[in-house]
Image: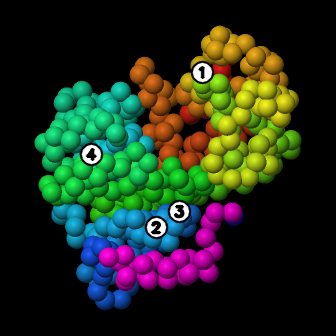
């Protein structure tokens, strides 16, 4: 498997982590005393690790051979921590653990689909702190969270970081979006298991998702004719195509499809114009992830040339917004980030070539 670690690579990775933790990069919180007892099993993620010591456990995040942040279990409060999140993606992992009552602050109340979260928000039990880049610092401080979960992509305000440090709020970066294997993204449930002191529960949940995902992937090998799959749609005159080594490309491959842009190697997206996309994928079999669109009429109003694509004419356009609320909050990102197995099952169903009833799809829906 392309992104799954072998036993040898696990050993090398663990050795690298130990070396980085010893030197600590000048940050005392990253150092330790005494030998590492063991490393928590991380099978797919390339970005985080958990080391077990005699007196504590330590979570760390690696990028480019350096520990960007690190957190010891002894730095967290005993019992249930108070948590604020800057994305429904992060809340989705907490919801999977059944610990929604720990969330005291969210970025925007419009983005959520979880019934428990919606009830708590409606009762005023959750504060609105604003989105990354526009965060209401004093509102966040008054909520007294123990941990703020954000992303390194959007949370880069040094002044805010220093202010939160003064009031003992730990900022933890959740960058699961950088992972390109669906199971690597799902494995971040182990980070949340660390935060809440529930590693066994997190491991069990991940094992369930992994087992389901691999079984579904193996079943997709029996799809006789792999459909050619295209993705995305125009946005501000640009059609951003995921690279052939991306998360989307891996999902399509594991679901038994052939990603039509797989020859464009890389993890990043390629900005193309409509003419280029039409030339390469005009004769695709299936079209998925068409931005915000829910009907073909709206697609045509946005750009009449969408009708030139074969899957549009064949009525084989699907989007991942079946579980979207009235404000545009999409459960594909809230629940789907962890439940990679449900995402893959939908795609296998779509790619199978059989007649599909809407009730068989969880996140996806036919755009007609």
Tag on residue 45? 3
**Residue furthest out toward the bottom:** 34
Q: Is residue 182 above or below residue 8?
A: above
Residue 131 screen position, x and y as percent:
33, 36
The residue at which mark 1 appears reads as 293
Tag on residue 62? 2
Alpha carbon of mark 1 to alpha carbon of mark 2: how far? 37 Å
* Residue sitting at x 59%, y 19%: 294
Secondary structure beneath dot 4 equals: strand
Using a 10 Å C-alpha cutoff, classify the residue at mark 2 as few (fewer than 14 neighbours), some (14 to 19) or many (20 or more). Answer: some
Front label number (2 vs 4): 2
Q: Nearer the viewer, residue 37 or 248?
A: 248
**Mark nearer the N terminus (3 vs 2):** 3
Horizontal relation, residue 17 to residue 210: left or right: left
Quarter of the image holding residue 7?
bottom right
Alpha carbon of mark 4 to alpha carbon of mark 1: how far? 31 Å
The residue at which mark 4 appears reads as 84
* Residue sitting at x 27%, y 76%: 28
The magenta stretch spans residue 329: no
Alpha carbon of mark 3 to alpha carbon of mark 2: how far? 10 Å
């Amino acid at each position: 498997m392309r992104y799954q670690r072998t036993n040898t690579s696990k050993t090398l990775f663990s050795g690298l982590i130990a070396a980085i933790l010893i030197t600590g990069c000048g940050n005392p919180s990253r150092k330790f005393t005494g030998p590492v007892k063991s490393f928590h099993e991380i099978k797919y993620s390339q970005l985080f690790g958990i080391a077990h010591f005699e007196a504590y456990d330590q979570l760390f995040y690696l990028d480019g051979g350096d520990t960007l942040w690190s957190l010891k279990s002894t730095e967290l409060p005993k019992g249930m921590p108070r948590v604020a999140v800057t994305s429904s993606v992060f809340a989705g992992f907490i919801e999977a653990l059944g610990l929604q009552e720990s969330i005291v602050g969210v970025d925007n109340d419009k983005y959520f689909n979880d019934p428990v979260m919606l009830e708590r928000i409606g009762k005023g039990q959750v504060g609105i702190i604003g989105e990354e880049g526009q965060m209401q610092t004093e509102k966040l401080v008054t909520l007294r969270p123990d941990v703020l979960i954000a992303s390194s992509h959007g949370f880069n305000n040094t002044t805010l970081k220093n202010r939160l440090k003064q009031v003992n709020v730990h900022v933890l970066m959740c960058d699961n979006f950088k992972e390109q294997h669906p199971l690597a993204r799902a494995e971040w449930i182990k980070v949340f298991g660390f935060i809440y002191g529930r590693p066994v529960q997190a491991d069990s949940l991940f094992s369930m998702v992994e087992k389901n995902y691999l079984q579904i992937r193996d079943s997709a090998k029996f799809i006789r004719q792999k459909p050619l799959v295209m993705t995305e749609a125009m946005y501000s005159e640009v059609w951003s195509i995921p690279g052939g080594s991306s998360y989307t490309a891996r999902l399509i491959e594991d679901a038994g499809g052939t990603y039509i842009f797989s020859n464009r190697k890389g993890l990043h997206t390629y900005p193309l114009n409509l003419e280029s996309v039409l030339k390469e994928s005009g004769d695709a079999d299936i079209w998925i992830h068409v931005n915000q669109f829910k009907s073909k009429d709206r697609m045509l109003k946005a750009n009449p040339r969408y009708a030139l694509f074969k899957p549009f004419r064949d009525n084989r356009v699907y989007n991942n917004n079946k579980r979207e609320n009235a404000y545009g909050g999409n459960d594909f990102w809230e629940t789907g980030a962890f439940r990679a197995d449900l995402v893959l099952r939908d795609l296998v169903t779509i790619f199978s070539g059989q007649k599909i009833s809407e009730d068989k799809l969880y996140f996806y829906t036919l755009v007609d």
